[in-house]
Image (cartoon, rainbow, N blue to C red):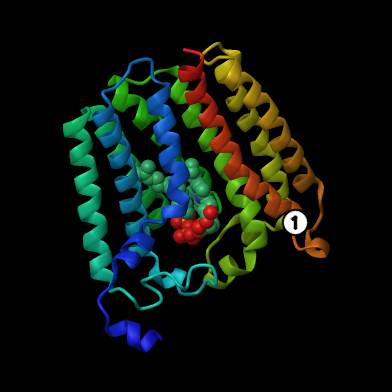
Amino acid sequence: MTTQTLVLPAEWRDFLALTKPRVMTLVVFTGLCGLLAAPVAIAPVLGFTAILCIALGAGAAGALNQWYEADIDALMKRTRGRPLPDGRMDRQSALHFGVGLAAFSVILMGLATNLLAAAILLASILFYVLIYTVWLKRRTPQNIVIGGAAGAFPPLIGWAAATGSIAPLPVLLFALVFLWTPPHFWSLALFVKTDYANAGVPMLPVVAGERATRLQIGLYTIPMAIAAIAPWALGLTGAIYGLASVAATAVFAAMALQVTLRRTGAEDGMRPEKRLFGYSILYLFLLFGAVAADRWVLA
Ligand code: HEM
Ligand SMILES: CC(C)=CCC/C(C)=C/CC/C(C)=C/COP(=O)(O)OP(=O)(O)O
């Protein structure tokens, strides 16, 4: 299989895989909801273009991330089937694809909407590729705390595309995704710890151990919950978001508390950790859906 694929040119499916399409659906959704929550109606064609640019920019960032880390991806079970470590694509194609797509997305964003949206899009691509992937990921277990900011920019980009400015609501949505990232990632890291240890990536459970990681999940959930409920508490959103954020955050907090209080997950195959990780994704979909619904359903 590998010998045959080595001589084949990469297929479009491999280029698609390079963009990490599953993770990026939520990134794009938060951008879309940031755009929809803005108090001005953007022309549909421009709104669509802005979201397309976020998708292409996020995809470009994913491709450049895979270009840079083909070596560690080859060492992890979860990632070794990706186009580069599996030998289905050469590194130069991935680099050209990533740089080309990044440039295209930022330029198109600037032309279709405004410079502020284009600048934040460029900053998030650079942040994910340079700050997270190249600089922090292999050096410190705080990699995802700082680097995670990259994934929190899309609501700001969406809002900026619609309004040309930023405001308290998208800043709080940025804070929500920023503070959500540690519990999201560390709950997963608890059950794929061996993979990271094998690849020599200093993720928190590898470096500080399981107990410390569980505690950090619990600790980050507190400011995350405050950021989640703040938009409603401050009167920036309405009842739909208020109800959704309080209910969904209570469930998140209960799950995170369970994970925090356990000493080990050895006896049940890390079921609560897997449940928290899965729910973390649904949680952001729910909250961002509610922000947009509040503006459009109750308008
Ligand atoms: C530095 C920050 C983050 C790290 C290290 C991280 C890491 C991961 C990893 C390793 C996975 C496993 C599955 C896979 O590779 O497909 C995953 C899944 C996922 N992440 Fe994150 N993540 C981060 C931030 C985010 C952000 C900001 C979002 C969206 C707003 C997000 C959305 C998702 C989604 C939707 C999945 C599930 C994908 C699937 O169904 O396969 N992540 N994340
Ligand atoms: C332009 C824009 C909006 C960019 C957003 C990019 C971004 C921060 C996306 C979410 C984070 C993500 C895919 C983390 C994967 O971590 P990893 O790279 O360590 O995962 P891996 O081990 O699966 O490669």
Residue 93 is left or right of residue 72, and the answer is left
Observer able to see residue 32? yes
Q: Residue at x 58, y 50 (%)?
A: 185
Q: Is residue 104 above or below residue 41?
A: below
* Residue 86 rendering spot, x and y as whole percentages: 40, 77
Give the secondary structure at mark 1. Answer: helix
Q: Residue at x 63, y 62 (%)?
A: 206
Q: Residue at x 16, y 33 (%)?
A: 111
- In depth, the one of 37 and 107 nearer the eye is 37
- In depth, the one of 141 and 65 nearer the eye is 65
| Residue 14 position by quadrant | bottom left
Q: Which quadrant does the N terminus fall into?
A: bottom left
Disc 1: CA contacts within 10 A as few (<14), some (14-19) or many (>=20): some
Residue 236 is left or right of residue 16, and the answer is right
- In depth, the one of 145 and 171 nearer the eye is 171
Q: Residue at x 37, y 58 (%)?
A: 65
Residue that mark 1 sits on: 271
Residue 151 is left or right of residue 88, and the answer is right
| Residue 115 position by quadrant | top left
Disc 1: residue Cβ within 8 A of ligand 1's nearest atom: no
Q: Is residue 295 above or below residue 96?
A: above
* Residue 12 rendering spot, x and y as whole percentages: 29, 65
Observer able to see residue 136? no
Residue type at the position of mark 1 = Arg
* Residue 279 rendering spot, x and y as whole percentages: 65, 44
Q: How many marks?
A: 1
Residue 89 is left or right of residue 258, and the answer is left
| Residue 205 position by quadrant | bottom right
* Residue 72 rendering spot, x and y as whole percentages: 46, 69
Name of the residue lying farthest toward the front:
297
Q: Is residue 210 above or below residue 165?
A: below
